[in-house]
Image (tube, helix red, strand yellow):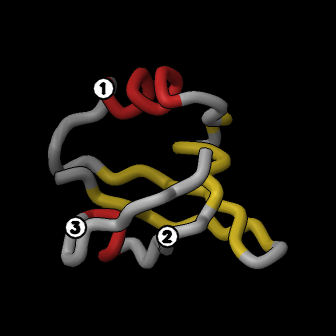
Amino acid sequence: MYISNITPAGPAAKADLHQGDILVALDGIAVSSEAALADIVSQKTAGESMLITVFRGGSRITVPLTLK
């Protein structure tokens, strides 16, 4: 999934995600659709952290993100 927007000062920006990153996985679970993304995130609560794996510039990068 292509990340098209990052909200300034939002959780994704704080996690150093970039517009154009390709979302690969959340907490090690592959994300292939918006429905899969919503399902994984819905199981979390505000304040919880998760590991986000993206593909950027030919490399996989994993960063922690705290949900708001």
Q: Nearer the viewer, mark 2 or mark 1?
A: 2
Q: Nearer the viewer, mark 3 or mark 1?
A: 3
Q: Considering the numbered disc 1 on the image, is that residue within a helix, a strand or a loop?
A: helix
Dot 3, how many residues are within 10 Å of its Cα: few (below 14), some (14-19), or many (20+)? few
Which of marks 1 and 3 precedes in the sequence?
A: 3
Q: Looking at numbered disc 3 in the image, what kind of residue is underneath it?
A: Gly
Which of marks 1 and 2 precedes in the sequence?
A: 2
**Which residue is tagged 2?**
19
**Which residue is tagged 1?**
42
Q: Looking at numbered disc 1 in the image, what kind of residue is underneath it?
A: Ser
**Which residue is tagged 3?**
10
Q: Are marks 3 and 1 in contact (CB under 8 Å)?
A: no
Residue 67 image point, x, y percent? 25, 51
Question: How far apart are labels 2 and 1 at the CA level?
Answer: 23 Å
- Tally of numbered discs: 3
Q: Is residue 30 above or below residue 49?
A: above
Which of marks 3 and 2 precedes in the sequence?
A: 3
Question: How far apart are labels 3 and 1 at the CA level?
Answer: 18 Å
Identify the residue shown where x is 48% and y is 21%. 35
